[in-house]
Image (tube, rainbow, N blue to C red):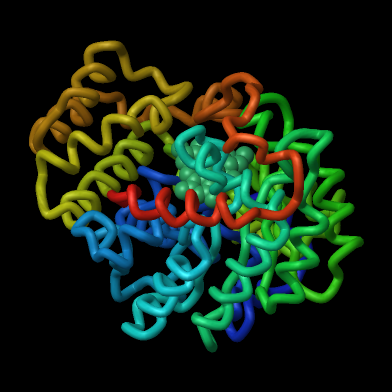
């Protein structure tokens, strides 16, 4: 069900990422295991914005592993096509960008400097990398150059911890290297997904780097949160991750809010079931396998039906179904007229967890440059990476 609220006036302009103009300043955050072609298409069916592919390991793309080649696929309806690259070795990331651009596989490339996962940061990647200013500068500069006319953006965290903040230096370097926009997930790596994002850091970044768009990220659970972030920080746009898990229609709310249209999706249980079914169907198309799609959508069940009265049999049945027919049978048992449950379906969802010390390479924090020994380690680290 869509309810109409009093229309407001349009908020902000379109989002400009180099030559790309997106009608509303809303970005679907890259999320590994989530923002594949199926999910991006689904979100796009409800809203407007830039929908970023989950992170692709540059080395795997250069090696053209089957998984990475599948993950970089886009549907013909996806315009612009946006891909996030991860890597630690500048030439490898630049080569991955050359492949994407040379083979016309992307219209926008985002670089991941926000990942706090130990297997990434232990090798100096993700959120650990901007601490090393020379390595960060080289990686971004070479990638921007390799991408040519395709705009490159960077996505980063505030830093490693409060004593080792990196975002202001890194954003200035990125701007000087020619990136088209910077997104800030306003947490340190040590915070992982715990506590609250520090939106004041987004405001500080916006005041510090004024000549390219600054996008704010962290803890947007509703369209009202998105407008509040813009109001409090002056950001040029918002990046939304966990808030849309099981709620692709949030992009409808966001588009309406930025356009001042005063619409809001408050789906009945039947409408949620339809969205879930559509997601499953798009996953079948993406994976080319009903069994694989049904396995993949299991992790979404709790998010879609959060707050709705679906009963434990249907819940566990959906989490074990292995065909669309089985999914239909379980969805058919639901009370499709059950109304939107309000607060029960809103608020935080997805990863939260606790703060923990970021795993880093030995002596990483001792200086802000990488020495020649470490470069050899980095190159080797890349070579051992495979998969998506
Ligand atoms: C399941 C999951 C996977 C993620 N994968 C990526 C990723 O591949 N690349 C990236 O830059 N950030 C990744 N993130 C971080 C999100 O893009 C986003 O920065 C973070 O969730 C904070 O935004 P939110 O509060 O709107 O969720 C991931 C987050 C989650 C929850």
Q: Tell me if 42 is positioned left or right of 212 in this view.
A: left
The percent position of residue 171, horizontal first and vertical second, equals: 76, 62
Q: Residue furthest front?
A: 373
Q: Nearer the viewer, residue 364 or 180?
A: 364
Q: Residue 12: give x, y in percent of width and height.
A: 77, 68
Q: Residue furthest top?
A: 312
Please say if 387 is above or below 312.
below
* Residue 133 pos. (x, y %): 72, 58
Residue at 72 percent of width and 39 percent of height? 365
User: At x 42% / y 35%, what residue is drawn?
Assistant: 268
76 lies above or below 167: below
Q: Residue at x 34, y 44 (%)?
A: 275
Q: Is residue 159 above or below residue 230?
A: above
Between 183 and 325, the residue placed more toward the observer is: 183
Residue at image coords 39%, 27%: 305
| Left or right relative to 244: residue 356 | right
Residue 343 visible to an observer of this rendering: yes
Q: Quadrant of residue 180?
A: bottom right
Pick the residue in front: 86 or 291.
Answer: 86
Q: Position of residue 229 (x, y in %)?
A: 78, 48
Query: Which quadrant of the figure has residue 38?
Result: bottom left
Is residue 244 visible in this depiction of the protein? no
Does 379 sit above or below residue 318?
Answer: below
In the picture provided, is 54 more to the left or to the right than 18?
left
- Nearest to the observer: residue 370 or residue 155: 370
Q: How many marks?
A: 0
């Amino acid at each position: 069900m869509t309810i109409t609220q009093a229309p407001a006036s349009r908020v902000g302009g379109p989002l400009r990422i180099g030559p790309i103009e997106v009608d509303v300043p809303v970005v679907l955050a890259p999320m590994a295991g989530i923002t594949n072609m199926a999910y991006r298409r689904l979100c796009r069916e409800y809203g407007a914005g830039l929908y970023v592919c989950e992170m692709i390991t540059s080395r795997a793309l250069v090696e053209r592993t089957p998984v990475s080649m599948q993950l970089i696929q886009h549907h013909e309806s996806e315009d612009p096509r946006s891909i996030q690259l991860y890597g630690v070795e500048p030439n490898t990331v630049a080569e991955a960008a050359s492949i994407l651009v040379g083979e016309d596989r992307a219209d926008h490339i985002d670089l991941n400097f926000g990942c706090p996962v130990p297997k990434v940061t232990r090798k100096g990647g993700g959120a650990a990398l901007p601490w090393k200013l020379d390595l960060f500068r080289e990686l971004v500069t070479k990638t921007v150059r390799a991408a040519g006319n395709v705009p490159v953006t960077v996505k980063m965290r505030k830093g490693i911890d409060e004593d080792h903040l990196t975002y202001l230096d890194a954003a200035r370097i990125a701007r000087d290297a020619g990136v088209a926009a910077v997104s800030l997930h306003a947490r340190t790596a040590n915070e992982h997904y715990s506590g609250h994002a520090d939106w004041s850091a987004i405001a500080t970044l916006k005041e510090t780097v004024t000549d390219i768009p600054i996008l704010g990220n962290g803890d947007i659970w509703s369209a009202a949160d998105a407008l509040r972030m813009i109001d409090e920080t002056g950001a040029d746009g918002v990046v939304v991750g966990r808030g849309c898990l099981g709620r692709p229609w949030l992009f409808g709310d966001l588009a309406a809010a930025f356009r001042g249209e005063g619409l809001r999706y408050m789906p009945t249980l039947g409408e949620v079931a339809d969205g879930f079914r559509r997601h499953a169907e798009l996953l079948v198309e993406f994976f080319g396998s009903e069994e694989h799609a049904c396995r993949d959508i299991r992790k979404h069940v709790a998010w879609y039906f959060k707050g709705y009265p679906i009963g434990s049999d249907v819940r566990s049945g959906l989490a074990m179904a292995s065909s669309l027919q089985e999914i239909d049978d379980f969805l058919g048992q639901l009370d499709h007229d059950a109304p939107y449950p309000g607060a029960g379906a809103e608020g935080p969802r997805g990863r939260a967890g606790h703060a923990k010390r970021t795993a880093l390479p030995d002596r990483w924090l001792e200086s802000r440059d990488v020495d020649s020994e470490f470069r050899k380690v980095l190159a080797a680290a890349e070579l051992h990476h495979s998969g998506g």
